[in-house]
Image (spheres, grey):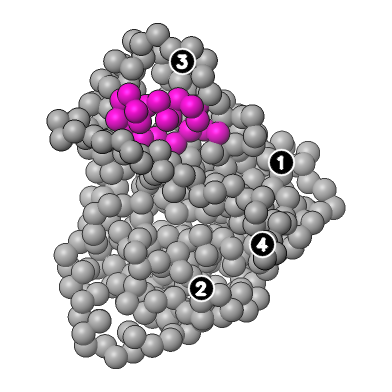
Amino acid sequence: MTPLNPALAATFPPPVMEARRWLEGISFPPARPLINVSQAAPVDPPPRALREVLADAALNRPEAHLYGPVLGNADLRRALAESWQRFYDAEVDATGVAITQGCNQAFCAAIATLAGAGDEVIIPVPWYFNHKMWLDMQGITAVPLPCGADMVPRAADAAARITSRSRAIVLVSPNNPTGAEYPAATLAEFHDLARQHGLALILDETYRDFDSRSGPPHRLLAGGVDDTLIQLYSFSKAFRLTGHRVGAVIASPARLAEMEKFLDTVAISTGQIGQIGAEWGLRNLGGWLADERRAILDRRAGMLRAAAQMPGWRVVSSGAYFAWLEHPFEMPSDDLARELVRQAAVLMLPGTMFMPQGQGQRHLRVAFANVDGPALMRMAERIADFSGQSLP
């Protein structure tokens, strides 16, 4: 066999793809279809008005089929900077905004400027698995940061894990996989800690538009964009542009100049049609996005009602797209998740996919954003029936 990068070989396989393989060979009758709560990506297309903008760009804008600027189209960078200014009531200039091929690439680009093999990055557990995968692929040590009972990490616990090899702290709020919404004071404490130790604070705000709280979730930009904070954002969730891969980074211009090297090497530029759609969405879909937020919050409430009908199960945390559940069985969550597919026609991800080896065996993640209230209640009924069985 030809050589294989040992860091890549040691990285666990993509969890969502792994879970999909559990469906192979299983048929789900029309009267009892699979209820899939394994993935958070929107399954519906963008609103029709946005699709018309995308179609018009494809047909009538020749530049939509060409390479664009590596850091993103100037009009989209300006529109996002203006949106950030309004939302956070802070000074954000377009020179501090870069557009990426999805938020995962934004994370990869940020890490590329910060750390290399042998360095350390502190990440809360449960973690977002793609963050952990990228660190493993680069030979960067992911230092686990346990969360409290409310699934919120503590800056004091992170401080105890900082070493001479530490380069960054990563936070995701609202969180994937737990849904937890980090308090503004907590984020401020992490920002102060990172600044004091000369580290970067990477704040992934993919699900920011679906936070249950009103107003800006923090004041980290009150003094403008600095060299400590790196914010990540996703248009995939905001405008359902998953297939177009449009994300963003908000960071200092000096940091973005380094990211440009990475982005130019791996992608050259983000797709033009998706950027055109994202820019139009920022200027025209504010009301539509507010409705989407209300719908997601309704589904969150529906998830909580459904969980109350699942004997022995407990909601540890919930918010935005996700709920983190504790199950009542002795079997580990990865075995339980497979049994739920076979016996209850429910697909959810086990906590073991989000935790270091040996952890997460009592937890599962439910991605409820694509499932309406009646379907969530059907899920609860199936799990209640399953829970009544005699299992080890």
- In the drawing, does residue 241 fall left or right of residue 332? left
Mark 1 vs mark 2, CA separation in Å? 28 Å
Closer to the eye: label 1 or 4: 4
Label 4 packing within 10 angstroms: few (<14), some (14-19), many (20+): few
Give the residue number, with chain letter if any, for mark 1.
158
- Dot 3 amino acid type: Pro
Residue at figure coordinates x 23%, y 34% from the top left: 28
Closer to the eye: label 1 or 3: 3
Give the residue number, with chain letter if any, for mark 3.
328
Tell me which label, 2 or 4, sits earlier in the chain. Answer: 4
Q: Residue 52's spot in the image, x, y percent?
A: 18, 73
Mark 3 vs mark 2, CA separation in Å? 45 Å
| 382 is within the stretch colored magenta | no
Q: Are dots 1 and 4 in contact, CB under 8 Å?
A: no
Looking at the rendered structure, the number of numbered marks drawn on it comes to 4
Q: Are dots 2 and 4 in contact, CB under 8 Å?
A: no
Give the residue number, with chain letter if any, for mark 4.
1
| Residue 98: numbered disc | 2
Residue at disc 2, secondary structure: strand
Q: Which contiguous range is marked in magenta?
A: 333-352
- Dot 4 amino acid type: Met
